[in-house]
Image: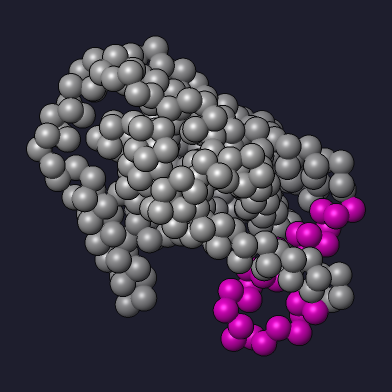
């Protein structure tokens, strides 16, 4: 209990510090207010639709992974469960994770297949990590020189690549351990032992279904790109207040790095940290005014949060249906 409270307090502190750092200047706040007043709602609507595509692809991907495990649920149920998971990830960080809620609803529908359902979620997460590694590798290959133009952006790039490098090493070790049957020999007190064992079992099963898994991976990559385009649309919605808006390639180049760093749960949903990263990366590399770079990150998050509210409505409806 003390550990959980400490984590939540740390997240609150980092979130508050990030928000203060980004929005404390009155001149910056005035510029943001002016930009929002003149924002183009058509671009915001397009961004909202882009994020809807993210969750639609997530539904298809998880349905594929569930069916490989022999769990057959209707599309509406899977889609609603994915949205409910998004709601809990967005609005109850550090308390009840979205993955826990996804499993809760699948367990109700398939009570005798709990282990298989857990493995599907583990593989879903693993595909998400692998897709970010893939996209970050493309950024390094084609735009690393651009990222290294300024000391601060260089440091951010190396931090993100360091985190991804550690993830790649862990994945490689996991694959090796699965291949040689070493996971069962892990000590019972080994950190994250249960998660590692679940991921290993998922790999062992899914490697025999290479084609659907490859399709799921491709869908994950496309979902990430749609997510990145949400932030591009948020940036373009502010074009009326400045001529300095980032290009598609600029946004696609920074987002794998931003995703990697905000994926570390040091703030609530990455709020504060995401805005700071946008300020430094888009401000230096794309010459976007700092205030507008920060509010771009916030608008992208708000678009995502609005879809999370849809998940909250789905959760309320499901609860009422159960009581009825």
Q: Residue at x 65, y 33 (%)?
A: 222
User: Which percent across, then down, holds residue 302?
Assistant: 35, 34
Task: Give the quadrant of the N terminus.
Answer: bottom left
Q: What is the magenta segment's predominant secondary structure?
A: helix
Residue 31 placement, left or right of 246: left
Residue 108 placement, left or right of 267: right
Q: Residue at x 67, y 54 (%)?
A: 126
In which quarter of the view is residue 193 placed?
bottom right
Q: Which residues are magenta?
A: 182-208
User: Which percent across, then down, holds residue 324?
Assistant: 46, 36
Residue 118 placement, left or right of 289: right
User: Which percent across, then down, holds residue 168?
Assistant: 67, 62
Q: Residue at x 35, y 45 (%)?
A: 280
Residue 83 colored in magenta in the image:
no
User: Which percent across, then down, holds residue 224?
Assistant: 59, 37
Instruction: Pick whichever, 285 or 275, lies toward us.
Output: 285
Instruction: Confirm whether residue 278 shows in the render.
Output: no
Q: Is residue 199 above or below residue 134?
A: below
Instruction: Pick whichever, 72 or 222, lies toward us.
Output: 222
Instruction: Confirm whether residue 69 shows in the render.
Output: yes
Instruction: Pick whichever, 65 or 23, lies toward us.
Output: 23
């Amino acid at each position: 209990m003390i550990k959980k409270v400490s984590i939540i307090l740390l997240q609150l502190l980092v979130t508050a510090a990030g928000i203060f750092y980004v929005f404390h200047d009155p001149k910056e706040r005035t510029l943001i207010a002016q930009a929002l007043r003149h924002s183009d709602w058509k671009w915001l609507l397009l961004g909202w639709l882009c994020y809807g595509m993210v969750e639609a692809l997530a539904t298809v991907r998880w349905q594929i992974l569930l069916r490989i495990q022999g769990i057959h649920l209707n599309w509406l149920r899977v889609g609603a469960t994915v949205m409910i998971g998004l709601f809990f990830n967005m609005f109850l960080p550090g308390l009840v994770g979205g993955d826990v809620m996804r499993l809760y609803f699948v367990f109700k529908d398939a009570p005798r297949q709990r282990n298989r359902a857990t493995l599907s979620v583990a593989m879903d997460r693993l595909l998400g990590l692998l897709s970010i590694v893939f996209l970050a590798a493309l950024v390094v290959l084609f735009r690393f020189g651009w990222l290294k133009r300024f000391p601060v952006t260089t440091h951010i790039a190396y931090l993100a690549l360091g985190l991804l490098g550690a993830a790649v090493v862990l994945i490689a070790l996991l694959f090796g351990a699965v291949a040689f049957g070493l996971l069962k020999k892990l000590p019972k007190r080994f950190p994250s032992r249960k998660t590692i064992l679940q991921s290993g079992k998922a790999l062992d099963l899914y490697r025999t279904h290479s084609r659907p898994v490859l399709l799921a991976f491709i869908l994950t990559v496309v979902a990430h790109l749609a997510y990145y385009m949400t932030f591009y649309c948020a940036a373009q919605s502010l074009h009326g207040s400045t001529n300095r808006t980032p290009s598609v390639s600029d946004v696609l180049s920074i987002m794998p790095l931003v995703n990697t760093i905000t994926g570390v749960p040091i703030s609530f949903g990455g709020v504060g940290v995401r805005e700071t990263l946008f300020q430094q990366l888009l401000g230096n590399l794309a010459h976007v005014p700092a205030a507008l770079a920060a509010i771009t990150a916030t608008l992208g998050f708000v678009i995502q949060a609005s879809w999370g509210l849809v998940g909250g409505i789905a959760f309320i409806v499901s609860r009422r249906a159960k009581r009825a």
